Image (spheres, rainbow, N blue to C red):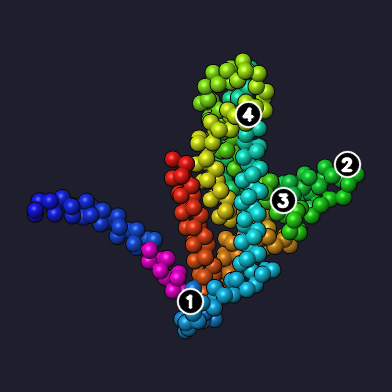
Amino acid sequence: MKAKSKRTIRPYLYLSPAWLVIGVVVLIPIIYTLAISLTNMNIWHWTNYSFIGIKNYIKAFTNMRTGFLSALFNTILWTFLNLFLQIILALFISLMLNTEGLRGKGLYKTLMMFSWAMPSYISALIWKHGMFQNDFGFLNQLLRMLGFKGIGWLNSDIPAFISCMIVNLWMSLPYMILVFYGGLQGIDKIYYESAEMEGASRRDKLHFITVPLLKPIVMPAIILTAFITFKQFDIIYLMTMQIGAKTGANIHTVITYAYENAFITNNYGYSSALSVLIFLIIVLLTVINQRNLKKED
Protein backbone atom coordinates (compact mmCIF):
# COMPACT_ATOMS: atom_id res chain seq x y z
CA MET A 1 0.00 0.00 0.00
CA LYS A 2 2.83 2.39 0.92
CA ALA A 3 4.70 1.54 -2.27
CA LYS A 4 1.57 2.29 -4.29
CA SER A 5 1.09 5.66 -2.59
CA LYS A 6 4.75 6.53 -3.26
CA ARG A 7 4.30 5.71 -6.93
CA THR A 8 1.22 7.95 -6.97
CA ILE A 9 2.91 10.88 -5.23
CA ARG A 10 6.26 10.69 -7.02
CA PRO A 11 5.09 12.17 -10.38
CA TYR A 12 3.59 15.15 -8.56
CA LEU A 13 6.85 15.72 -6.71
CA TYR A 14 8.71 15.73 -10.02
CA LEU A 15 6.22 18.23 -11.45
CA SER A 16 6.20 20.53 -8.42
CA PRO A 17 9.15 22.73 -9.58
CA ALA A 18 7.38 23.35 -12.90
CA TRP A 19 4.13 24.15 -11.10
CA LEU A 20 5.99 26.57 -8.85
CA VAL A 21 7.50 28.37 -11.84
CA ILE A 22 4.12 28.51 -13.60
CA GLY A 23 2.52 29.86 -10.43
CA VAL A 24 5.11 32.62 -10.07
CA VAL A 25 5.37 33.56 -13.76
CA VAL A 26 1.74 33.11 -14.88
CA LEU A 27 -0.79 32.83 -12.07
CA ILE A 28 0.48 35.60 -9.79
CA PRO A 29 0.49 38.27 -12.57
CA ILE A 30 -3.02 37.20 -13.63
CA ILE A 31 -4.33 37.44 -10.06
CA TYR A 32 -2.59 40.80 -9.56
CA THR A 33 -4.02 42.17 -12.84
CA LEU A 34 -7.50 41.00 -11.83
CA ALA A 35 -7.13 42.76 -8.47
CA ILE A 36 -5.91 46.02 -10.06
CA SER A 37 -8.81 45.92 -12.53
CA LEU A 38 -11.18 46.43 -9.60
CA THR A 39 -9.48 49.68 -8.53
CA ASN A 40 -9.03 53.23 -9.84
CA MET A 41 -5.24 52.97 -9.99
CA ASN A 42 -3.71 55.55 -12.33
CA ILE A 43 -0.81 57.97 -12.40
CA TRP A 44 -2.59 60.20 -9.85
CA HIS A 45 -3.58 57.29 -7.59
CA TRP A 46 -0.43 55.18 -7.74
CA THR A 47 -0.36 54.20 -4.06
CA ASN A 48 -3.62 55.60 -2.67
CA TYR A 49 -5.95 53.89 -5.13
CA SER A 50 -9.34 52.64 -3.95
CA PHE A 51 -11.62 49.71 -4.70
CA ILE A 52 -14.34 50.58 -7.25
CA GLY A 53 -15.76 47.13 -8.04
CA ILE A 54 -16.66 46.40 -11.65
CA LYS A 55 -16.88 50.03 -12.79
CA ASN A 56 -13.94 49.57 -15.16
CA TYR A 57 -15.70 46.64 -16.82
CA ILE A 58 -18.94 48.64 -17.11
CA LYS A 59 -16.96 51.47 -18.70
CA ALA A 60 -15.50 49.05 -21.24
CA PHE A 61 -18.96 47.99 -22.42
CA THR A 62 -20.72 51.37 -22.36
CA ASN A 63 -18.47 53.48 -24.61
CA MET A 64 -19.65 52.24 -28.00
CA ARG A 65 -17.94 54.52 -30.53
CA THR A 66 -14.38 54.93 -29.24
CA GLY A 67 -14.05 52.39 -26.43
CA PHE A 68 -13.44 48.70 -26.02
CA LEU A 69 -16.41 47.56 -28.11
CA SER A 70 -15.26 49.64 -31.06
CA ALA A 71 -11.75 48.21 -30.70
CA LEU A 72 -13.20 44.69 -30.44
CA PHE A 73 -15.16 45.21 -33.67
CA ASN A 74 -11.99 46.45 -35.39
CA THR A 75 -10.11 43.42 -34.09
CA ILE A 76 -12.71 40.95 -35.38
CA LEU A 77 -12.80 42.69 -38.77
CA TRP A 78 -9.00 42.82 -38.89
CA THR A 79 -8.66 39.12 -38.04
CA PHE A 80 -11.36 37.94 -40.44
CA LEU A 81 -10.20 39.96 -43.46
CA ASN A 82 -6.52 39.13 -42.97
CA LEU A 83 -7.23 35.44 -42.48
CA PHE A 84 -9.61 35.26 -45.45
CA LEU A 85 -7.15 36.96 -47.81
CA GLN A 86 -4.24 34.86 -46.56
CA ILE A 87 -6.13 31.60 -47.18
CA ILE A 88 -7.30 32.61 -50.67
CA LEU A 89 -3.94 34.02 -51.78
CA ALA A 90 -1.94 31.18 -50.21
CA LEU A 91 -4.08 28.57 -51.97
CA PHE A 92 -3.81 30.35 -55.33
CA ILE A 93 -0.04 30.94 -55.13
CA SER A 94 0.72 27.45 -53.79
CA LEU A 95 -1.29 25.92 -56.66
CA MET A 96 0.83 27.93 -59.08
CA LEU A 97 4.05 26.83 -57.38
CA ASN A 98 2.85 23.23 -57.52
CA THR A 99 2.43 23.39 -61.30
CA GLU A 100 4.49 20.74 -63.06
CA GLY A 101 7.33 22.12 -65.15
CA LEU A 102 7.45 25.49 -63.39
CA ARG A 103 11.02 26.77 -63.41
CA GLY A 104 12.67 28.61 -60.53
CA LYS A 105 10.52 27.19 -57.73
CA GLY A 106 13.43 27.32 -55.30
CA LEU A 107 14.10 30.97 -56.18
CA TYR A 108 10.46 31.95 -55.70
CA LYS A 109 10.29 30.26 -52.30
CA THR A 110 13.56 31.89 -51.22
CA LEU A 111 12.34 35.36 -52.24
CA MET A 112 9.08 34.82 -50.36
CA MET A 113 10.93 34.07 -47.15
CA PHE A 114 12.57 37.52 -47.03
CA SER A 115 9.40 39.31 -45.94
CA TRP A 116 8.56 36.60 -43.38
CA ALA A 117 12.07 36.51 -41.91
CA MET A 118 12.49 40.30 -41.72
CA PRO A 119 11.84 41.82 -38.25
CA SER A 120 8.38 43.37 -38.06
CA TYR A 121 9.77 46.70 -36.81
CA ILE A 122 11.95 47.10 -39.90
CA SER A 123 9.19 45.93 -42.26
CA ALA A 124 6.64 48.36 -40.82
CA LEU A 125 9.00 51.34 -41.06
CA ILE A 126 10.05 50.45 -44.62
CA TRP A 127 6.42 50.39 -45.72
CA LYS A 128 5.49 53.46 -43.68
CA HIS A 129 8.25 55.73 -44.99
CA GLY A 130 9.14 54.06 -48.27
CA MET A 131 5.70 53.23 -49.66
CA PHE A 132 2.97 55.16 -47.80
CA GLN A 133 4.71 58.47 -47.00
CA ASN A 134 2.56 61.35 -48.29
CA ASP A 135 5.20 63.41 -50.12
CA PHE A 136 8.01 61.03 -51.04
CA GLY A 137 6.43 57.57 -50.75
CA PHE A 138 6.61 55.35 -53.82
CA LEU A 139 2.84 54.89 -54.14
CA ASN A 140 2.01 58.62 -54.13
CA GLN A 141 4.86 59.39 -56.51
CA LEU A 142 3.50 56.74 -58.87
CA LEU A 143 -0.02 58.20 -58.62
CA ARG A 144 1.27 61.69 -59.41
CA MET A 145 3.22 60.39 -62.40
CA LEU A 146 -0.06 58.92 -63.70
CA GLY A 147 -1.85 62.25 -63.21
CA PHE A 148 -3.70 61.45 -59.98
CA LYS A 149 -3.57 63.13 -56.59
CA GLY A 150 -1.64 61.53 -53.76
CA ILE A 151 -3.52 59.67 -51.04
CA GLY A 152 -3.07 60.16 -47.30
CA TRP A 153 -2.53 56.45 -46.77
CA LEU A 154 -2.04 56.68 -43.02
CA ASN A 155 -3.91 59.91 -42.26
CA SER A 156 -7.45 58.53 -41.94
CA ASP A 157 -8.98 55.33 -40.65
CA ILE A 158 -10.01 53.36 -43.76
CA PRO A 159 -6.85 53.93 -45.86
CA ALA A 160 -4.70 53.27 -42.78
CA PHE A 161 -6.60 50.05 -42.04
CA ILE A 162 -6.03 48.86 -45.63
CA SER A 163 -2.36 49.89 -45.49
CA CYS A 164 -1.79 47.95 -42.27
CA MET A 165 -3.51 44.94 -43.83
CA ILE A 166 -1.17 45.10 -46.83
CA VAL A 167 1.87 45.11 -44.53
CA ASN A 168 0.49 42.25 -42.44
CA LEU A 169 -0.20 40.19 -45.57
CA TRP A 170 3.28 40.92 -46.89
CA MET A 171 4.81 39.66 -43.64
CA SER A 172 2.51 36.70 -42.89
CA LEU A 173 1.55 35.31 -46.28
CA PRO A 174 4.83 33.43 -47.01
CA TYR A 175 4.32 31.16 -44.00
CA MET A 176 0.80 30.26 -45.11
CA ILE A 177 1.97 29.69 -48.69
CA LEU A 178 4.65 27.25 -47.56
CA VAL A 179 2.14 25.34 -45.42
CA PHE A 180 -0.32 25.06 -48.32
CA TYR A 181 2.47 24.15 -50.73
CA GLY A 182 3.72 21.42 -48.38
CA GLY A 183 0.19 20.07 -48.14
CA LEU A 184 -0.16 19.99 -51.92
CA GLN A 185 3.13 18.13 -52.21
CA GLY A 186 1.73 15.43 -49.92
CA ILE A 187 -1.38 14.74 -52.03
CA ASP A 188 -0.95 11.63 -54.15
CA LYS A 189 -1.30 12.44 -57.86
CA ILE A 190 -3.25 9.23 -58.41
CA TYR A 191 -6.36 11.03 -57.09
CA TYR A 192 -6.12 13.64 -59.85
CA GLU A 193 -5.41 11.02 -62.50
CA SER A 194 -8.48 9.03 -61.46
CA ALA A 195 -10.58 12.19 -61.49
CA GLU A 196 -9.40 13.07 -64.99
CA MET A 197 -10.38 9.61 -66.19
CA GLU A 198 -13.87 10.27 -64.82
CA GLY A 199 -14.02 13.58 -66.71
CA ALA A 200 -13.63 15.89 -63.70
CA SER A 201 -12.88 19.55 -64.40
CA ARG A 202 -10.22 21.63 -62.63
CA ARG A 203 -12.90 23.11 -60.42
CA ASP A 204 -14.15 19.64 -59.48
CA LYS A 205 -10.64 18.47 -58.62
CA LEU A 206 -10.08 21.57 -56.49
CA HIS A 207 -13.42 21.21 -54.70
CA PHE A 208 -13.53 17.45 -54.18
CA ILE A 209 -9.83 16.50 -53.90
CA THR A 210 -7.51 19.40 -53.12
CA VAL A 211 -9.51 21.28 -50.49
CA PRO A 212 -10.70 18.21 -48.47
CA LEU A 213 -7.20 16.69 -48.40
CA LEU A 214 -5.56 20.02 -47.55
CA LYS A 215 -7.93 20.84 -44.70
CA PRO A 216 -6.46 18.60 -41.96
CA ILE A 217 -2.94 19.68 -42.93
CA VAL A 218 -3.41 23.46 -43.05
CA MET A 219 -6.05 23.84 -40.31
CA PRO A 220 -3.51 24.05 -37.43
CA ALA A 221 -1.61 26.77 -39.32
CA ILE A 222 -4.85 28.66 -39.98
CA ILE A 223 -5.82 28.52 -36.29
CA LEU A 224 -2.35 29.63 -35.21
CA THR A 225 -2.41 32.50 -37.71
CA ALA A 226 -5.86 33.54 -36.47
CA PHE A 227 -4.60 33.86 -32.89
CA ILE A 228 -1.47 35.73 -33.99
CA THR A 229 -3.52 38.12 -36.14
CA PHE A 230 -6.05 38.69 -33.35
CA LYS A 231 -3.35 39.90 -30.97
CA GLN A 232 -1.36 41.81 -33.60
CA PHE A 233 0.18 44.95 -32.12
CA ASP A 234 3.43 46.06 -33.70
CA ILE A 235 2.22 46.72 -37.27
CA ILE A 236 -0.75 48.90 -36.28
CA TYR A 237 1.19 50.71 -33.57
CA LEU A 238 4.30 51.41 -35.66
CA MET A 239 2.32 52.43 -38.74
CA THR A 240 -0.17 54.80 -37.08
CA MET A 241 0.35 55.34 -33.35
CA GLN A 242 4.06 55.47 -32.56
CA ILE A 243 4.79 58.26 -30.09
CA GLY A 244 6.18 61.28 -31.92
CA ALA A 245 5.10 59.89 -35.30
CA LYS A 246 1.30 59.66 -35.15
CA THR A 247 -0.33 59.87 -38.54
CA GLY A 248 -3.89 60.91 -37.67
CA ALA A 249 -5.59 57.54 -38.06
CA ASN A 250 -7.37 55.98 -35.11
CA ILE A 251 -7.85 52.25 -35.78
CA HIS A 252 -7.50 50.73 -32.35
CA THR A 253 -7.62 46.99 -31.84
CA VAL A 254 -8.14 45.58 -28.35
CA ILE A 255 -4.37 45.24 -27.87
CA THR A 256 -3.47 48.79 -28.94
CA TYR A 257 -6.43 50.17 -26.97
CA ALA A 258 -5.27 48.43 -23.79
CA TYR A 259 -1.69 49.58 -24.43
CA GLU A 260 -2.73 53.21 -24.87
CA ASN A 261 -4.70 53.19 -21.61
CA ALA A 262 -1.81 51.58 -19.75
CA PHE A 263 1.22 53.48 -21.04
CA ILE A 264 -0.08 56.68 -22.67
CA THR A 265 -2.96 57.80 -20.44
CA ASN A 266 -1.61 55.76 -17.48
CA ASN A 267 -5.05 54.48 -16.47
CA TYR A 268 -3.79 51.23 -14.97
CA GLY A 269 -7.04 50.05 -13.40
CA TYR A 270 -8.99 50.39 -16.65
CA SER A 271 -6.20 48.88 -18.76
CA SER A 272 -6.03 45.92 -16.35
CA ALA A 273 -9.76 45.36 -16.83
CA LEU A 274 -9.21 45.43 -20.60
CA SER A 275 -6.40 42.90 -20.23
CA VAL A 276 -8.67 40.57 -18.26
CA LEU A 277 -11.36 40.85 -20.95
CA ILE A 278 -8.83 40.10 -23.70
CA PHE A 279 -7.57 37.12 -21.72
CA LEU A 280 -11.12 35.76 -21.33
CA ILE A 281 -11.80 36.20 -25.05
CA ILE A 282 -8.65 34.26 -25.96
CA VAL A 283 -9.53 31.51 -23.45
CA LEU A 284 -13.05 31.29 -24.93
CA LEU A 285 -11.69 31.04 -28.48
CA THR A 286 -9.23 28.37 -27.36
CA VAL A 287 -11.99 26.27 -25.75
CA ILE A 288 -14.16 26.56 -28.88
CA ASN A 289 -11.21 25.58 -31.05
CA GLN A 290 -10.41 22.54 -28.90
CA ARG A 291 -14.03 21.35 -29.04
CA ASN A 292 -14.11 21.70 -32.82
CA LEU A 293 -10.88 19.72 -33.13
CA LYS A 294 -12.28 16.95 -30.92
CA LYS A 295 -15.43 16.77 -33.07
CA GLU A 296 -13.33 16.45 -36.22
CA ASP A 297 -11.20 13.71 -34.64
Mark 2: give few (<14), some (14-19) or many (20+) Cα within 10 Å: few
Q: Tell me which residue sits at (60%, 24%) in the image.
A: 98
Is 24 on the left-hand or right-hand side of 209?
Answer: left
Q: Are marks 1 and 2 in contact (CB under 8 Å)?
A: no
Q: Residue 31 in magenta?
A: yes
Secondary element type, mark 4: helix
Provide the residue span drawn in magenta.
27-36
Question: Which amino acid type is shown beneath numbered disc 4?
Answer: Leu
The residue pinned by badge 4 equals 206
Q: Nearer the viewer, mark 1 or mark 2?
A: 1
Residue type indicated by callout 1 = Leu
Circle 1 SS class? loop
CA gap, disc 3 and disc 4: 30 Å
Pick the front one: 93 or 219: 219
Circle 3 crowding by C-alpha within 10 Å: few under 14, some 14–19, many from 20: some
Q: Mark 3 is on which residue type?
A: Ile
User: Measured along the vertical axis of the image, is residue 94 above or below residue 254?
Assistant: above
Give the residue furthest to the right: 147
Residue 178, by quadrant, is top right
The residue singled out by tag 3 in the image is 162
**Residue marked by disc 2:** 146
Real-space Cα distance between discs 1 and 3?
Answer: 36 Å
